[in-house]
Amino acid sequence: MTISSPQAIHQRIVELEVEHRDLDEVIETLIHDGRHEELQLRRLKKRKLQLKDNITLLKMQLIPDIPA
């Protein structure tokens, strides 16, 4: 997926950050509740890392290339 306009990139970053924050809350709740499956927890953590990577990539698109 390629997003071209800076406004669209900012909007997508906000959406991903909200999902990342929500996943963080779900993971913390599952850990403190004590009634979680390890596989489920691993999948949630993996998704959270994927979101963080996507956020980083989108933020890098906003930074203009600086010639060395």
Image (cartoon, helix red, strand yellow):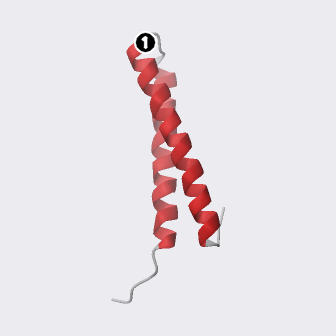
Residue at the image point whose x is 55% and y is 53% from the top: 14
Q: Assign a secondary structure to mark 1.
A: helix
Q: Residues within 10 Å of mark 1 (few under 14, many from 20)?
A: few
Front-lying residue, 32 or 1: 32
Vertical order, 41 against 36 (above or below): below
Residue at the image point whose x is 54% and y is 43% from the top: 18
In percent of width and height, residue 54 lies at: 52, 55
Q: How many marks?
A: 1
Residue at the image point whose x is 51% and y is 31% from the top: 43
Taking the image as shown, residue 1 lies to the left or right of residue 32, namely right
Vertical order, 66 against 33 (above or below): below
In percent of width and height, residue 20 lies at: 50, 41
Front-lying residue, 66 or 43: 66
Quarter of the image for residue 28 reads top left
Front-lying residue, 48 or 9: 9
In percent of width and height, residue 64 lies at: 46, 80
Taking the image as shown, residue 35 lies to the left or right of residue 16, namely left
In percent of width and height, residue 63 lies at: 45, 74
Name the residue furthest top.
35
Vertical order, 5 against 29 (above or below): below
Assign the N terminus to one quadrant of the image: bottom right
Q: State the residue position of label 1.
A: 33
Name the amino acid, label 1: Asp
